[in-house]
Image: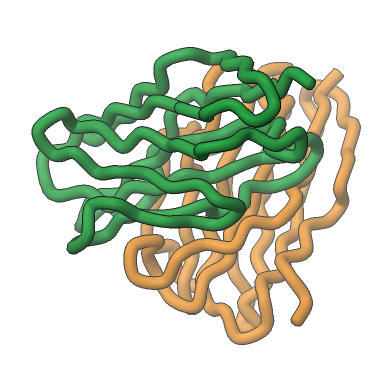
Chain colours: A orange, B green
């Protein structure tokens, strides 16, 4: 059974550009959550999608957005990149909404470096 | 609001010694509590979780944790450390009605041969 696939694994972007990260959940999983991991702020929740709908959103500026497709794959987009957006972005896949009921399986992440 | 405090950003133990990683939480409602492990350049792997019921929870790789409501703690232990346990460990909490995970700042565990 394939795990959670995040692409690309590494990305280097210039300040001011935009970036799109992709997450393919485990087959049959319908919920995807995104987390940002930085040395300064640690692990922070970005958003959660279930059945193409955003169910929950963290405290991030509007430059951070996401979506989920009908096949449950999810993308997150960051516009007007800032140096502080450099981070490991982790995607978590679950059968249904909410970590309490269904649990998460995390991908290996996309490491974004903004220069 | 829920929050998690992990005491000790770095812990070193000798191979074969007891591992104790501390986690205290703050939650206004009965929480679900989790421990995750992260190896370099990898995502998070669930070690164990507490939901309801038995307060001593056993997880993978010989780890266990005990939920102590009176102390608002959920410390992670392993009787005998192995070199392969070297990693970063994160405690996390989730509340009903706000089911995101709120993580602690992590504890990097080093095993001394």
Front residue of B37/A85: it is B37
Q: Does residue B48 lie above or below B71 as drawn?
A: below
- Does A8 sit left or right of A99 as displayed? right
Q: In the image, residue B94 lies at what x, y percent? A: 31, 49
Front residue of A8/A115: it is A8
- Does A79 sit left or right of B78 as displayed? right
Quadrant hosting residue A32 = bottom right
Q: Residue at x 9, y 33 (%)?
A: B70
Q: Residue at x 44, y 76 (%)?
A: A96
Can see residue A95?
A: yes
Quadrant hosting residue A28 = bottom right
Can see residue A66?
A: no
Dividing the image into 4 quarters, which one contains the C terminus of chain B? top right
Dividing the image into 4 quarters, which one contains the N terminus of chain B? top left
Q: In the image, residue B73 lies at what x, y percent? A: 25, 32
User: How many numbered discs, if any?
Assistant: 0
Q: In the image, residue A88 lies at what x, y percent? A: 71, 36
- Give the residue furthest to the front: B16
Q: Residue at x 73, y 70 (%)?
A: A3
Q: Residue at x 88, y 38 (%)?
A: A11
- Does B86 sit left or right of B21 as displayed? right
Q: Does residue B76 lie above or below B44 as drawn?
A: above
Q: In the image, residue B38 lies at what x, y percent? A: 66, 40
């Amino acid at each position: 059974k394939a795990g959670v696939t995040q692409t690309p694994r590494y990305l280097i972007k210039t300040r001011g550009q935009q970036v799109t990260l992709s997450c393919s959940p485990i087959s049959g999983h319908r919920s995807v959550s995104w987390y940002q991991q930085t040395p300064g702020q640690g692990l922070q929740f970005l958003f959660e999608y279930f059945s193409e709908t955003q169910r929950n959103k963290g405290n991030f500026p509007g430059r951070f957005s996401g979506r989920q497709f009908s096949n449950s794959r999810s993308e997150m987009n960051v516009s007007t990149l800032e140096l502080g957006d450099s981070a490991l972005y982790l995607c978590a896949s679950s059968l249904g909404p909410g970590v309490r009921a269904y649990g998460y399986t995390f991908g290996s992440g996309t490491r974004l470096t903004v220069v | 609001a829920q929050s998690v405090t992990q005491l000790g950003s770095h812990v070193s133990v000798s191979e074969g010694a007891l591992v104790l990683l501390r986690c205290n939480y703050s939650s206004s409602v009965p929480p679900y509590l989790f421990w995750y492990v992260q190896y370099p350049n990898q995502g998070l792997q669930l070690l164990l979780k507490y939901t309801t019921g038995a307060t001593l929870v056993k997880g993978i790789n010989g780890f266990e944790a005990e939920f102590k409501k009176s102390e608002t703690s959920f410390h992670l232990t392993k009787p005998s450390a192995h070199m392969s346990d070297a990693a970063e460990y994160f405690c996390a909490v989730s509340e009903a009605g706000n089911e995101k995970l709120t993580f602690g700042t992590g504890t990097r565990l080093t095993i001394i041969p």
